[in-house]
Amino acid sequence: MSENAVLQTALAILLLPIVSYVILFFFGKKLPRRGDWLGTGLLGVAWLLALRIFCHFWSVGDPQLRVHGAWPWLDLGGFRIDAGILVDGMTAVMLVVVTTISFFVHMFSIGYMHGDRRYERYFAFLGFFTFSMLGIVLSSSLFFLYVSWELVGLASYLLIGFFFHKPSAAAANKKAFLTNRVGDFGFFLGILTFFTVCGTLDYFELFAKVHQGAIGGALLTWAGIGLFMGCVGKSAQVPLHIWLPDAMEGPTPVSALIHAATMVAAGVYMVARLLPLFDPGALLVVAYTGAITAFLAATIAVVKTDIKKSLAYSTISQLGYMVMAIGVGGAAYGMFHLTTHAFFKALLFLGAGSVIHSVHSQEMPEMGGLRHKMPITFWTFLIATMAIAGVPLLSGFYSKDAILGAALSFGMLEGHFAPFLLALLAAGFTAFYMFRMVFLTFTGKPRDHHKWEHAHESPWVMAGPLVALAFLSIVSAGWRGPADGWFARFVAPYDMERVVARYGDAPAAQVAAVHETAAAHDVAEASGHGAPETHAAPETHATTDAHATTDAHDAHVEHVHHQAHLIAMFLSIAIAGLGILLSWLTYQKGRISAAAALARFPRVHNVLQNMYYFDEFYAATVYRGVLAWSRASGWFDRVVIDGIVNGCGYLTRFTSWVIGVFDLRGVDGAVNGVAWLMQGAGEGFRRVQTGRVQTYLVFVCFSVVLLIFVFRAL
Amino acid sequence: MNAGLEHFLTVGALLFGLGVFAVLTRRNAVGLLMGVELILNAANLNFAAFARYVEHGIDGQVLAAFVIVLAAAEAAVALAIVLAMFRNFGTVHVDAVDRLRR
Amino acid sequence: MGEHVLSWMTFAPLVGMVVIAFLPRERPTLTKVVAAAAAAVPLLLAFQVFATFDRSTAEMQFVERGSWIAPFNIEYFMGIDGLSVTMVLLTALLSFLCIIASWRIDKAVKGYFALFLLLETGMMGVFCALDFFLFYVFWEVMLLPMYFLIGIWGGPRKEYAAIKFFLYTLAGSVLMLLAMLAFYFNVRNPDTGAHTFNMLHMMDQANHSPWLQLSHVRHLIWIALFIGFAIKVPIFPFHTWLPDAHVEAPTAVSVILAGVLLKMGTYGILRISYPMLPDAALWFAYPLAILGMINIIYGALCAMAQSDMKKLVAYSSISHMGYVLLGMSAFTTQGINGAVMQMFNHGTITAMLFLCVGVIYDRAHHRDIDGFGGLGLQMPVYTSVFSLALFAALGLPGLSGFISEALVFLGAFPTYRTITIISALGIVLGAAYVLWMLQRVFLGEKNPKYDSLPDISARELATLVPIAAVVVWVGVQPSPVLDLMRVTLNNLIATVGR
């Protein structure tokens, strides 16, 4: 495939689902079968195209092969944003993961959503989601990453709230969107910081700038943490994980697609994709956040009885693994786990969907003994469970083991053992609660006979995807760890020298159109072949970036890695086995009474059952705080500001009244008063004016006498 | 006993006081005129006395002569007014003639 | 028509008004048709303007010039550049759609449509006038019909709202008048040496008299102009007329009020204050940014506290106008382009919101957010349209509001770091009040009281779909709008800039 062909194929993959959305949204009702075949078919085509790209990258086998096309989109003169598509190994893997899961979920939904009154709307939304998710995967600039990021948020909102007539669903989708927005706030600020300092939003130009030291120190750390906040929101990491369990209000296939396999993994993908933008300080935050999330969520999953809620916490926990993997320097392991997890977790959710579809309940205590009623569901579910629990030879074992190894070597090299320990404990819990789920749901005696009677295996349109995903859950084990398997061909750290050579301080590269890009790539490739040593072996970037120069150190690091992976493997097998054993003893054999255990630690149970009181905490602080502020603002506006305004009005009216009174009594009064005074005076003086000369003369005489006295006194 | 200036002035003052008294109290216009004459003559006396004792000239006498002429003219005019007043109002009482006041 | 496009656009509605005055009272439909026809003329010409507008120059275009009141050198001087062209297009579009949206007015039909057309003339004139006196005249012409439209066709407290609006705006006008006279007596036409009202002459600093070059004088004039315009925007704390006016005004008037009238404040600042007093603009930039931030956050918080839909939308307008202020106070390419684009986008988005509120008010006769519930199942088409408007309002990518908000933030962040960070909280708060309202009105269990509400009608849809198309189109492909304004605004920034 030529570069152009890759770009066109990628574009086609991106646009097929949105075509599906537009057609189904406006005309879905009029189509035969309300258009489900259209959405599924288009997704199938997209899936085949994705496989084609995947095969191309596999056959090339160069992890540094990047196809980058950009089209001018917005130009302000001095500031421009290009719509760019980036296809490289990581993208190819993600394309396959997203389209595969999406295709199977489409197919599964044909059975699951059958007869819903907004059936065609559902498929339209699925198409819209897939489009947005592919946008995240294919975007080559932070701007369009953010755009797609928000759009998947909208898709998630629409699909969580698909049954919006349920008040719980209506609250859940709002919660999901808002929680994500809080994360996006940080994400956006991170983007703003990078843009302000580096003046570009394109990934590789940013990488080059950061590599050249355009941004550093605390600012880089904080900007990285800002970006990571986006991941915390989207990938449901502590403390913004609260939305994901509630998001289970959506239809179960949606949970499989969005809230297990793809969208929640977008955060992981984003951090892995933008790895050069995170400095060790930010990555430490990433590692700890992931580890804590993995542990907390796993413990909560142990006590949940709702099958979907339990799976939701399992998802959060596994996402914590992936995030931690990136933080401890195993980004490729994280991506590997993302891939395997996508398959087996989608399978688990679809399996749960199959069960729910069959028994019309989500409560595990009401199930039991479904194994014979639903054999396909049972066996596929079991495979996925073993995969997630870390049973050797299944995919989850390899990916989780790789992460644990990376975490342990991180601890050995950097002294931070806490992530490893938390993750190890979480692995034990995972094995325990997953098998608890299997035992409670499928084996033993049916606890609700009425429901059991009516249970039935799902139709093939639903069972088919289960089988396919089970197959993938097993097969993807063969992809192995990035260090030794061929997954390494797809997810390798960036070769910063080449990135800088191609994108550094050359503003012309910013406006590269497709053919220019192709040419530039040829040049880059030629130089790459000329200097094979730039193809550095995959290495942990964060810890070793600074010291990679010394060979001795490299050897030491290599040794530690090897050692750590061995230890981690044995430990993880042991703890998974322990978890499975305990689960078996408790829920299958009944040797350990779960009720008794809970009764012994009522406080622990309470804390877990209430999910560490995160919701209560937010309700008491954030929600109440914001509402109080908003009410205070409303009050302030109504009473104070409007009060001032109305007060001004009243003051004016009062003043005018006073002036009116003053005018009537004062000014007019003064005028009249003068007249009155004059009249009075005239009245008085009139009496003096007798007209008698003698009277006047008397006055004259008196006056003279008076004057005499006056002058005498002087 | 030699008559000095003070005697003349005393007589003059007496005359003046009588004249003023007449002017102030008399209701009859003719009496009133007579009071005025008394005042004028008191002044004449004083002129003559001062001329004799203080100035040793004839200025005082000349002025006195002027005053006498003037008084005569004044009396003529005033009596004509009194006559007209009597003709118009039928009385020579001054307080009855206060038409201007109304 | 070719030569006098702007005059036609401005005065065609006035002609319509005169025609309406002679129509018989018994034939209201005829009145409406005439009004629609009169408003259609500017709309059609707007397409011509959009097609022929030269995007590569910052000069005034479609200029018309003639002497008007010669003794005072007052001219009839019209013209548009990249700053005003978007506003002219917006005015033409919204006025026409509002006339369609007013079809169900049945009280004093002749008066309503006559006043509405007069209002359009005033608005068009304000955006086209290049003579300060002419500008002022149009500015005042607009006031009167607005007063009556609110005061006669409004809701229960219409008199209060109308008087509040009128007095507030008039107070602003007085200050503007003083500033205008200060300019008139201190600016001379370089050709004739006479005093002039010509804005272009006023913008040229070389024409200013020595008195007008004193910095405290300039600051004083800036403040006077600013308060005049701030009342219109409205900028905190001069904003309380807005919720009252919106709540009481009939739907179409609310649309015009929020869609066009608010823009006049920011338009005035950019058209008059910035180029005429560039140094004072820089002097006031920081306070302006702070006011923008207050508008964003405070408006959003107040919106969250409202239970009346129209009030919520009104406060959201205050919040959104804050983005305009923040963007234009930054003096960067992205900031100013984002700000003017936000003016345009807010005009379309808020118009949609008010039209949507009007739709439900016509049916349920109240606007209490908590009084609905579950309308999503009852009125699916209406829900889709309203949701589109609401999501555009909360700045969802793919819809127009996002582009301008993102540009504003990208432009403001380098200049004002802390202020921008605080303002960015507005995107969270914005989502909060929008989604909360969405949840309470459309989601959840259906309120049985409204089981028989009909979905949106074709006529209502016809008023909303064109705006929705603009919102989506600009959101996906912003360059057609940005290209219109880009050169002019970059030129403005270059002359004012730092």
Image (spheres, rainbow, N blue to C red):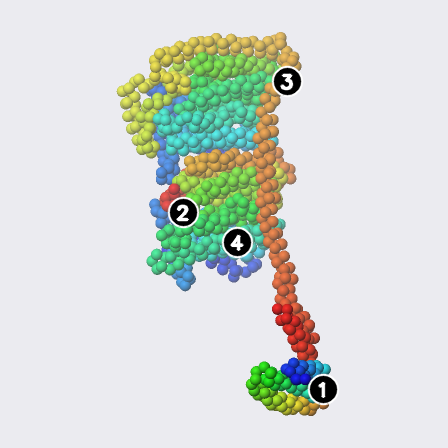
10 Å crowding of disc 3: few (<14), some (14-19), many (20+)? few
Q: Chain of mark 2?
A: C
Q: Is residue C400 above or below residue C73?
A: above
Q: Which residue is mark 2?
A: C278
Residue C463 visible in image: no
Mark 1 and mark 2: span between their CA atoms?
97 Å
Q: Chain of mark 3?
A: A
Q: Are marks 3 and 1 on the same chain?
A: no
Mark 4 and mark 1: span between their CA atoms?
81 Å
SS for callout 1: loop
Q: Residue at x 39, y 13 (%)?
A: A557
Q: Which residue is mark 3?
A: A603
Q: Which residue is mark 4?
A: C170
* Front residue (pair B31, A683): B31
Residue C447, given in percent of the width and then of the height, sits at 63, 37
Q: Are marks 4 and 3 on the same chain?
A: no
Amino acid type shown at disc 4: Leu
Which quadrant is the C terminus of chain A positioned in? Answer: bottom right
SS for callout 4: helix
Q: Which residue is mark 1?
A: B28
Q: Is residue A468 left or right of residue A582?
A: left
**Which of pointers 1 and 2 indicates the residue nearer the eye?**
1
Mark 4 and mark 3: span between their CA atoms?
67 Å
10 Å crowding of disc 2: few (<14), some (14-19), many (20+)? many
Residue C192 visible in image: yes
Q: Is residue A260 above or below residue A436?
A: below
Q: Residue at x 46, y 53 (%)?
A: C179
Amino acid type shown at disc 1: Asn
